[in-house]
Image (cartoon, rainbow, N blue to C red):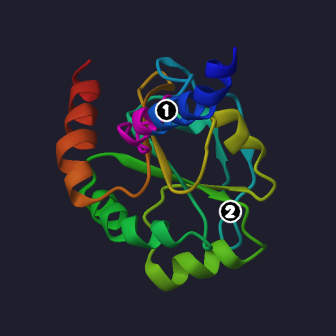
Amino acid sequence: MRRFALFAPLLAFALIGAVFAIGLTRDPARIPSALIDRPLPDFALPPIEGRTEGLSSEDLKGEVSLLNVFGSWCASCLIEHPTLMEIARSGDVAVYGLNWKDRPGDGAAWLARHGDPYARIGDDPRGHVVVALGVTGAPETFVIDKEGRVRYKHVGPITPEVWRRTLAPLIEELKRT
């Protein structure tokens, strides 16, 4: 019993080290979503300031689309914004926005300053819809198929490489089905 007491701290340290080592091998951008291949949760959000139309889950049916969660407070959203602008200009896929936890007017001012790639934007100031979507932080982007099912969730900024290697091929595949 005395020997066990001597080795217990070493054993505990080794166990904690193993857990951390395993955690470090995982990609933090690959957060699984319970919504994959399931219908988008029902929602209806009001528009942000300056827009007349909000965003609902029904708007995301009938065509393959992207649903991008952003906020004016989000530094990474600024990183991905030029890529979203290019995607919107290309017309390859409709881009919808979900403005998360912004104060009134902040999201609209941010888009006026940086450009607006969104076909429609819903305002979610209290974060009720993002909770239903399982969002852990901004930016996050969901690929939605023609039937309104979530087919992919991307955590973090969409870079040109992410678009080219992951999202664009998936969208093209979904358009063919």
Q: Are marks 1 and 2 in contact (CB under 8 Å)?
A: no
Q: Secondary structure at mark 1?
A: helix
Q: Residue furthest top?
A: 1
Question: Relative to 94, does residue 83 appear above or below in the rendering?
Answer: below
Question: Relative to 160, does residue 74 appear above or below in the rendering?
Answer: below
Q: For this view, does 129 lie left or right of residue 57? A: right
Q: Which residues are magenta?
A: 21-32
Q: Is residue 24 magenta?
A: yes
What kind of residue is marked 2? Thr
The quadrant in which residue 57 appears is top right
Please state, as top left, top right, bottom left or bottom right, where the C terminus lies in the image. top left
- Mark 2 crowd level (few <14, some 14–19, many ≥20, 10 Å Cα): few
Frontmost residue, 96 versus 137: 137
> Taken as a whole, is the magenta stretch helix, strand or loop?
loop
Circle 1 is placed at which residue position?
14
Q: For this view, does 67 lie left or right of residue 87? A: right
- Mark 1 crowd level (few <14, some 14–19, many ≥20, 10 Å Cα): few
Circle 2 is placed at which residue position?
52
